[in-house]
Image (cartoon, rainbow, N blue to C red):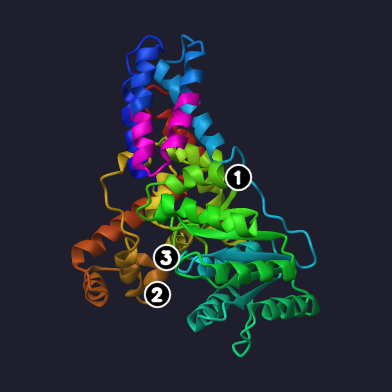
Amino acid sequence: MFENLSEKFDKAFKLLKGQGRITEINVAETLKEVRKALLDADVNYKIAKEFTDKVKAKALGSDVLTSVSPGQLLVKITHDELTELMGGHKEGINLSGTPSVILIAGLQGSGKTTFSGKLANLLKNKEKKQVLLVAGDVYRPAAINQLKVLGEQIGVEVYADENNKNPVDIAQKAIAHAKASGKQIVIVDTAGRLAVDEEMMQEISKVKAAVQPQETLFVVDAMTGQDAVNTAKAFNDRIDYSGVVLTKLDGDTRGGAALTIRSVVEKPIKFVGTGEKMEALDVFYPERMADRILGMGDIVSLVERAQQNFDEEQARKLQKKIAKNQFNFNDFYDQIQQIKKMGNLKDLVGMIPGMGKAMKDTEIDDDAFKGIEAIIMSMTPQEREDPAIINGSRRKRIADGSGTNIQEVNKLMKQFEETRKVMRMMSNPAKMAGMMRGMPGMKR
């Protein structure tokens, strides 16, 4: 996400490295590169120019403190302006109403149905709400089936009526069903088209007028760049939605839509999709996104994702096992599953300050754990429970069973033992303190 833009911003700010103070000449040269970076990211020229003009005016009007370099000051000003460009602050979702109705709109292929499932999953698990998904796409049978599959996957009821071709009637009956069954939130997935057309606009307008939703969310594919912004404006002019959802932000996106959609339609970005998994949905924070664009990482979002997939009772049990040196391959496997739930690996690495830049030329495969999982699952239950019994002949059998080789099995065994040692040491503060005192430069 935003890799090219981050790299070009970094190069632009290097032009100020070593400069003693900000001048009109050196700031103009830097911001010329910043503007080029924005244009390459598919940001509208007018918006890119207005952005750099604002940064320039603030930079030239600022006093540079002796403890802050001109480059650092310009990064700070650019960060603040990027945050403002994307909305300034997080906009929450309106969940008033009994039930709360959320209408989902967008073009076909934008990811509406998948987003509907992700949002239901988030509201069910994070907000502890009873959710009803509504299959309101009467034209595409696959959309109804897809929503049913997603609903089953996340444990959320789906209201569908394949014989009814009236989306307004389906939505109204679904809301009546939600009231009768005690559902607190109704998410209505509507039909999309391959392009903006009058028939689609009239239909979605009628559905909105009939159900009076608390939220109307427009879903747009971030990979379509400036076209996404134009489509967002066309929809907003007709249905006056309350917020934007950017999907596929983990793909090969240049970022123009995320940067400019707010200023064009004057509606907040509320969510961003960062992968295919049901957990890969984030609330949009403009300041955190600005951090990531400027290569500062996003440690807060990383911690929040970890907490969402964190089972306190399981963690307490694991801590006891570590303290007793009973951490085994079953626990190791469970930890891998927890990491996988947090999202794709490349996205997670990008959230660690400095790591996105350090790993920019490294391919991070989302299937990186497959080999490890295959090795662990090729062990017998006894071997997973008691790794000490895994001798040479057992390692050979495990390698054959997992489609790997003996070297890979040995490597995993070594990594496992090192992980177990570190975890045990960290669970014992006295040992940790003793080790620290023994380090060079540390005093008692």
Q: Residue 210 or 114: which is nearer the viewer? A: 210
Question: Which residue has dot 2 on it?
Answer: 382
Do labels 3 and 2 touch, CB within 8 Å?
no
User: Which amino acid type corresponds to the residue marked 3 in the rendered image?
Assistant: Tyr
Q: For residue 34: magenta?
A: yes
Q: Secondary structure at mark 2?
A: helix
Q: What x and y, as percent, mark residue 150?
A: 53, 75
User: Which amino acid type corresponds to the residue marked 1 in the rendered image?
Assistant: Glu
- Which of marks 2 and 3 precedes in the sequence? 3
- The residue sitting at the bottom extreme is 163
- Which residue is at 64% across, 76% downward? 134
User: Which amino acid type corresponds to the residue marked 2 in the rendered image?
Assistant: Gln
Q: Residue 104 or 249: which is nearer the viewer? A: 104
Q: Secondary structure at mark 1?
A: loop
- Which of marks 1 and 3 precedes in the sequence? 1
Residue 167 visible to an observer of this rendering: yes
Q: What x and y, as percent, mark residue 22?
A: 41, 13
Cα–Cα gap, marks 1 and 2: 60 Å
State the mark number for residue 333. 3
